[in-house]
Amino acid sequence: MKRTVIRILLADDSVVILERITELLREVDGIELAGRAGGVGESSRLIEQLHPDVVILDLQMPDGSGFDIIESIKESCPEPVVIVLTNSGALPVRERCLKSGANFFLDKSNKFELLPQIVRGIVGTVRAAPNPV
């Protein structure tokens, strides 16, 4: 059975950023915003409960690092697509994210607007995949 929507979890401690992401993604068909989290613990719990297809996350959280979330995601099955959206755009941070298992890395200061385009691409890929058992 093919999926009709992909489920997205937003993980950022800034309500302003969560609202901006939500607004940007309103124009993308085929998605459901399954949940929002403001910290590492809450993010990990929601990933386990909701099994999202995509996790959009910041690296700087009040109770830890987004790297902790990436590592825990990569231990889960099936793993969601991870999009890091952060203010920490330095090359070493980008390299560490991608090496840790993030699929995309966006700097909030200059790549934020690419998010809908990336999610549209993921929608096509995830819709074509069978539902996990």
Image (cartoon, rainbow, N blue to C red):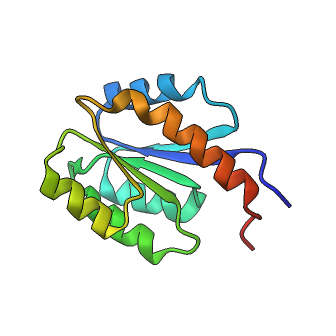
Extreme residue toward the right, this view: 1
Q: Which quadrant holds the C terminus?
A: bottom right
Instruction: Classify residue 109 as left or right of residue 21.
Output: left
Task: Report if residue 55 is visible in the image.
Answer: yes
- Residue for point 75% across, 64% down: 131
- Residue for point 42% across, 25% down: 19
- Residue for point 23% across, 49% down: 61
Instruction: Classify residue 77 as left or right of residue 11.
Output: right
- Name the spot of residue 37 as percent of width and height, x first: 41, 46
- Name the spot of residue 93 as percent of width and height, x first: 17, 55
Q: Which quadrant holds the N terminus?
A: bottom right
Give above or below for 119 relative to 17: below
Which sits in the foreground, 8 or 91? 91
- Name the spot of residue 13 as percent of width and height, x first: 29, 40
- Residue for point 53% across, 52% down: 54
Which sits in the foreground, 65 or 82? 82
- Name the spot of residue 20 as percent of width and height, x first: 40, 24
Q: Quadrant of residue 21?
A: top left
Which sits in the foreground, 78 or 91? 91
Instruction: Classify residue 94 as left or right of residue 2.
Output: left
* Callout count: 0
Task: Report if residue 64 is visible in the image.
Answer: no
